[in-house]
Image (cartoon, rainbow, N blue to C red):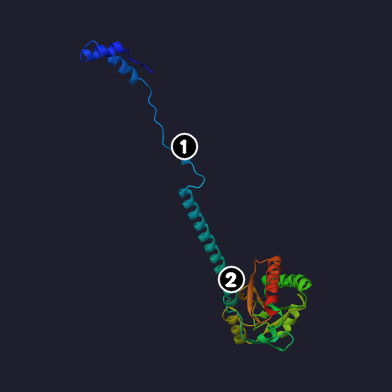
Amino acid sequence: MISVSRRALQACTREALGNRCAPQIRCHRSFFTRLPHRSYSSSSPQSAVGVFTPKSAALFILTGLGLLWYFRQEKAKLIEQQEKERASKAYGRPMVGGPFSLTTHTGSTYTEQDLLGKWSLVYFGFTNCPDICPAELDKMGLFLNAAEKEHGMIFNPVFVSVDPARDSPARIAVYLKDFHPAFTGLVGSYQAVKAMCKAYRVYFSTPPNTKPEDDYLVDHSIFVYLMDPKGQFVEAFGQSVTIEEMLQKVHEEIEAWKPETG
């Protein structure tokens, strides 16, 4: 510690701090002012760093609540989607099918009751069709060969003529010999055929002013209608649907049918 001599202090005191002592005192004061000044914090830096501060705790709680809300919303969406699927399956089927009465290619009466008990595949066409109808009936035959191996004899293929003016039961019987032996051919009066087509939402149109002996084509819808053993509509397979796709869809429907019917 720096000290001032006693003689200097006494001299300054006697002369009331005259001009001779001022520089010396200023010198000592200037020395003291050069000492470094340190400021000390009242708290340690470690005390500002906590493992679980109030801010992080609040953030953690908010994140947890957000995740809880998110998962509840997703669960609610899943349940809603499942309910929609069940409702669509139970109530969302198109109104396809209904009562009808036609004549088979063997001359017997055939109604909607004859579709019950098996999985029916119903196709509308005519025997003079040059290419589309034979191709679709061939595809149905290949489907039946594969499906019967997997599921047994539970299918009922039906061919309905939309050309009643030319397609007699006998003519249909000859025509069906080229296709799968399980086919049942149906025909009736123009009004009876029209009524069934309306029930199945099938479009067909015969050129106007035609005679049975004329060579003409009938424009018609190209679908294979799958009906379940209760006679209810399941699916309509278009011309572009492959045999593999038909087999997959029918397999799914049969598997779903088993729990429902026991």
73 horizontally vs 89: left or right: left
Q: Nearer the viewer, residue 34 or 259?
A: 34
On screen, 75 above or below 260? above
Judging by the rendered image, the residue that carries numbered circle 1 is: 45
Under mark 2, the amino acid is Glu
Of tags 2 and 1, the one toward the viewer is 1
Q: Residues within 10 Å of mark 2 (few under 14, many from 20)?
A: few
Q: Residue at x 73, y 70 (%)?
A: 143
Image location (x, y in percent) of residue 89 = 60, 74
Q: Is residue 54 above or below residue 120?
A: above
Query: Residue at label 2?
Result: 85
Please state which amino acid type lies under the numbered disc 1.
Pro
User: For residue 170, what is the image quadrant?
Assistant: bottom right
Please report whichever mark, 2 or 1, sits nearer to the chain's N-terminal start.
1
| 252 relative to 17 in the view: left or right | right
The C terminus - image quarter: bottom right
Left or right of 21, for residue 210: right
Instruction: Say if residue 206 shows up in the picture.
Output: no
Measured Cα–Cα span from mark 2 to mark 1:
61 Å
- Residue 1, x across and y down, in percent: 38, 18
Are discs 2 and 1 less than 8 Å apart at CB? no
Q: Examine the rendering and report whether any part of residue 254 can be seen.
A: yes
